Image (cartoon, rainbow, N blue to C red):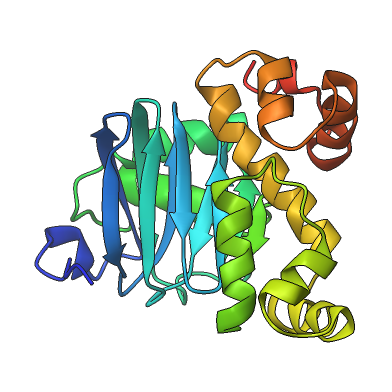
Amino acid sequence: MVDHSHLPYESLGMPVTGVSVDYPNGHQVPAHSHPRAQLIYAISGVLLVETAAGRWVIPPTRGVWVQAGVEHALRIRGKACMRSLFVHTDAVEGLPTGNCVIDVSPLLRELIQAATQVPTQYREDSRDGRLMRFLLDELRSLPVLPFHLPWPDDERITRACLALTQNPAQDDGAEHWAEQLAMSPKTFHRRFLASTGITFGRWRQQARLLLSLEALAEGQPVLQVALQHGYESQSAFAAAFRRQFGVAPSSFYK
């Protein structure tokens, strides 16, 4: 795990600190953690955040809240202009209590941008201090979004999940994976639900849809994305996508 404790913003006593970093397409940040909670937000590009408990795909206008001390790695798709907030979890009541994806409103986006321009040390009774308090208030009422893919804690179930994420178009069912993992279909379904919290069918659909966001961010045609992610037609993909995210695939990044 990468040690970030030497970085100046890690040891600050301020309730919240803003940091601005840009990454090129394909960049990877190895597993690391922070002593404060982190809100990761990208103005552009798609971020893939991976922890032992789950994976999040973060398109622009969304952010991921990572609890203090949680080890996580980042992968970048497209040029990412990343803005982060590091927040003491006792700075204000009502902050998220778990790792989650949140909607970044236009107001919150501007506050995050402004926070990255604030010096690392500021007086709480100054204009910068009032800005940060306003920002903390906004963080208390964030809608949680369905961009999370729970990762199994069962070693054998993990093998199936890795194969499905590496090739989301494959159509092998639960019976196939039960046979591959030397267990009955009933046992496979039971262990899958116990280790991920959702059924095999729902997990596979969620994985396909979240992975499709990467391809859409790269500008690939919707039909091509649909076929590459296990859908027989563009209309079937669009219907599932709209149910999950509330908009059509062609409108997601507009």
Q: Look at the image and tell me whether residue 65 can be seen.
A: yes
Q: Is residue 211 left or right of residue 238?
A: left
Q: State the image quarter where residue 246 is shown.
A: top right
- The N terminus appears in which quarter of the rendering? bottom left
Identify whether 17 is placed above or below 31. Answer: above
Q: Is residue 157 left or right of residue 1?
A: right
| Residue 216 screen position, x and y as percent | 60, 24
User: How many discs mark residues in the rendered view?
Assistant: 0
Residue at point 74%, 23% (across, down): 249
| Residue 151 screen position, x and y as percent | 60, 69
| Residue 81 screen position, x and y as percent | 35, 30
Identify whether 206 is placed above or below 88. Answer: above
- The C terminus appears in which quarter of the rendering? top right
Q: State the image quarter where residue 34 is shown.
A: bottom left
Front residue of 248 and 105: 248
Front residue of 98 and 113: 98
Residue at point 19%, 67% (across, down): 2
Identify whether 179 is placed above or below 103. Answer: below
Identify whether 128 is placed above or below 98. Answer: above
| Residue 46 screen position, x and y as percent | 48, 35
